Amino acid sequence: MAEFLLERTVPLPLDEAWRRVTDWPRHGDVVPFTRVTSDGRFVRARTGLGPAGFLDLMEITVWSPPVDGAAGLCRLEKRGRVVRGWAELEVLPGPGGRSRVRWREDLGIRFLPRLADPVVRATGRYVFGRALNRLLRGR
């Protein structure tokens, strides 16, 4: 499994940062070749072109939005056949009324040996780092 951490400080109030990072369909707009849906308990990210692709099925196991200036946390457990691990999206109070956003993920790809973890980690940091930047920009 390849664990990585992304952190950003943004000029947004906590509730707006939370709304942007947990807008699941928007994740599909910012991650290439991916479509994301959610039913409130599960998030389904289908990545691929045409019939070639895979489903990243994630169960929301913690849903604690920010309230009264306190941090918010969402934990997703990956339940798919190909993608394993978990992800945590956290929004915290930052300096000067800003918000700090943390995206921690432990990502595993079935059938890939642990030897591939550095490549999976670097790819995850790049792809999800760009996605997080775009989510927080709101475009």
Image: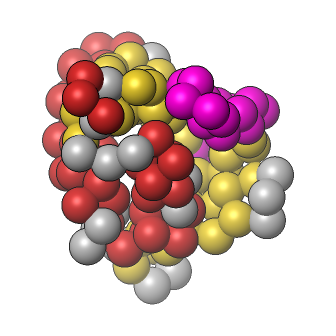
Q: Is residue 75 above or below residue 13?
A: above
Which quadrant would residue 100 be assigned to in this image?
A: top left
> What residue lies at 29% left-to-right and 36% top-to-bottom?
98
Residue 109, image x, y percentages: 47, 35
Does residue 134 appear in the picture of this structure? no
> What residue lies at 45% left-to-right and 69% top-to-bottom?
26
Does residue 11 appear in the picture of this structure? yes
Magenta segment includes 65:
yes
Towards the viewer: 91 or 79: 91
Give the extent of the magenta segment. 61-82
> What residue lies at 64% left-to-right and 60% top-to-bottom?
44
User: Which image quarter holds the C terminus?
Assistant: bottom left
Q: Is residue 30 left or right of residue 51?
A: left
Q: Is residue 47 above or below residue 15?
A: below
> What residue lies at 52% left-to-right and 48% top-to-bottom?
15
Residue 60, image x, y percentages: 73, 41
Which quadrant would residue 4 be assigned to in this image?
A: top left
Q: Is residue 77 above or below residue 114?
A: below
Q: Is residue 74 left or right of residue 131?
A: right
Q: Is residue 114 above or below residue 66?
A: above
Give the farthest residue toward the bottom: 50
Residue 23, image x, y percentages: 53, 62
Magenta segment includes 103:
no
Towards the viewer: 126 or 88: 88
Q: Is residue 101 left or right of residue 109?
A: left
Tell how many labels. 0
User: Which image quarter holds the N terminus?
Assistant: top left
Display colour scheme: secondary structure
Residue 85, image x, y percentages: 57, 27
